[in-house]
Amino acid sequence: MSNTGQLWTIDELGSQVALALATGYDGAPNGRVRGIPDLRTIRYYTTLGLLDRPAQMRGRTALYAHRHLLQLVAVKRLQARGLALAEIQEKLLGQTDRKLASIAQLPEPTTPTPEAGPEPNGERADFWKTAPAEPPRGSDSLEIAAPAKPHVPLQGVPLADNVTLLLSTLRPLETDDLEALRAVAAPLLKLLHARRLLGPRPEGDPS
């Protein structure tokens, strides 16, 4: 049910006791004893010697160990048999963990059932460490190939001292291409100058 090396706060210890008594426990026969010990009861059992002092202190927080769980559940099991606290004190005083465990009868830890069966070699593979297998090539497989993109070189066309037009074209630019591009680019250069996105307009530039 629990890790014997684990430590709990007093609230967590109470929760562990509740889990241990969730099945097979009907409470004390007189009905006057609290079924699940609350924080006040746990502290009271400590003053009576039914519960050991905390295993550790983390600052001002007390931490309890597996033996404390055995002691508390054993007390509740014996109360369910009708024993008074004085009788339980005599019975549990100085008992070993093995004896306490036989009285407490903690439920066995449950092993979670894996969602998928084991691998053929007995070990479950870490799926994130294994590359997915390629789909079989055949009539039933769907293959989507990305279209090949030809390599198209970039060619620069100087339009002004600090303006260059980049073209991605397979055909080399000829002289008339350059002249035509510069002619239609005149309004663009004028706009760039007007918005002060370029340097001062060269003297004699009609644009």
Image (cartoon, rainbow, N blue to C red):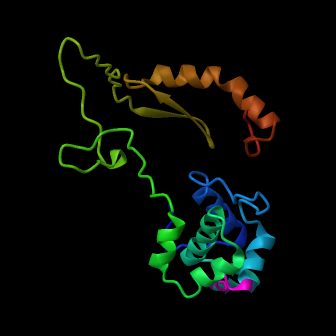
Q: Is residue 51 visible to us here? A: no
Q: Viewed as shown, does residue 74 lie left or right of 171? A: right
Main SS, magenta region, reads loop
Q: Viewed as shown, does residue 196 lie left or right of 27? A: right
Residue 97 on the magenta segment? no
Q: Is residue 9 visible to us here? A: yes
Q: Position of residue 156 (x, y in %)?
A: 49, 35
Q: Is residue 197 above or below residue 134?
A: below
Occupied quadrant, residue 29: bottom right
Occupied quadrant, residue 192: top right
Please tell me which residue lies in front, 123 or 25.
Answer: 25
Please tell me which residue lies in front, 169 or 123.
Answer: 123
Occupied quadrant, residue 76: bottom right
Q: Is residue 132 above or below residue 58?
A: above
Residue 53 on the magenta segment? yes
Residue at figure coordinates x 18%, y 48% from the top left: 121
Q: Viewed as shown, does residue 138 lie left or right of 53? A: left
Residue at figure coordinates x 81%, y 72% from the top left: 40
Look at the image and tell me in which quarter the C terminus lies. top right
Q: Is residue 8 above or below residue 147?
A: below
Residue at figure coordinates x 77%, y 72% from the top left: 41
Residue at figure coordinates x 60%, y 65% from the top left: 77
Q: Is residue 23 above or below residue 193?
A: below
Q: Position of residue 123 (x, y in %)?
A: 25, 51
Q: How many marks?
A: 0
Magenta segment: 48-55
Q: Position of residue 180 (x, y in %)?
A: 55, 19
Please tell me which residue lies in front, 83 or 167.
Answer: 83
Please tell me which residue lies in front, 118 or 20.
Answer: 20
